[in-house]
Amino acid sequence: MLRTEGYVCVKEAAALLGVAPNTVRAWGAAGRIPECRHPVNRYRMYKRADLEQVNRQVEQSFALPAAARKRKPR
């Protein structure tokens, strides 16, 4: 029995990341997202934990510095 728990396919990965499926494929091919292949059908598979880490990194890169958040608008 194959264990694919914790893994998602391209379409699900795209939904989690908020991008198009072709973008997920390109990022995987470029090594930006770790990908593996299903041993039977060779479909691309992505660990959900890896995708969640990518989302956290993106969120952190767009987060405002603490000083900017405390300023009041004029």
Image: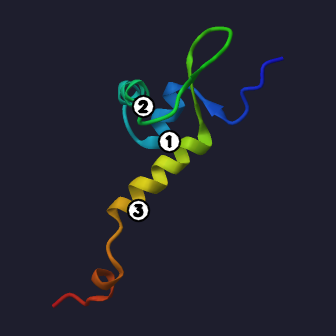
Q: Say what amino acid the circle numbered 3 marks.
A: Gln
Above or below: residue 44 compared with residue 7: above
At a point 52% along the width and 50% down the height, the residue shown is 53
Report the mark closest to the observer, 2 or 3. 2
Q: CA distance from mark 2 to mark 3?
A: 20 Å
Q: Quadrant of residue 41?
A: top right
**Where does label 3 land, which residue?**
60
Q: Residue at x 68, y 9 (%)?
A: 40
The mark closer to the camera, 1 or 3, is: 3
N-terminal of the pair, mark 1 or mark 3, is 1
Q: Earlier in the sequence, mark 1 or mark 2?
A: 1
Work out whether residue 36 or residue 18 is closer to the camera in this orientation and state it: 36
Tell me the crowding category of disc 3: few under 14, some 14 to 19, or many 20 or more residues within 10 angstroms, Cα based: few
Task: Name the amino acid type tagged 2.
Answer: Gly
Identify whether 11 is placed above or below 42: below
Quickly name the residue at label 2: 31
Q: What residue sits 59% from the left and 11% below the top?
A: 42
Tell me which residue sits at (84%, 17%) in the image.
1
Residue ranking furthest to the front: 31
Task: Kindly report which numbered mark, 1 or 2, lies closer to the viewer in this rendering.
Answer: 2
User: Which element is circle 2 on?
Assistant: loop
Between marks 1 and 3, how big is the CA–CA gap? 17 Å
Instruction: Using the rendered view, name the quadrant where residue 71 is placed.
Output: bottom left
| For residue 36, above or below residue 33 | above
Mark identifier at residue 68: none
Q: Nearer the viewer, residue 32 or 56?
A: 32
Give the numbered dot on residue 16.
1
- Is the C-beta separation of discs 2 and 3 under 8 Å? no
Point out residue 24 in the picture as x, y percentages from the top left corner.
41, 30
**Callout 1: 10 Å neighbours few (<14), some, many (20+)?**
some
> Horizontally, is 59 left or right of 13 in the view?
left
Q: How is the image coloured?
A: rainbow
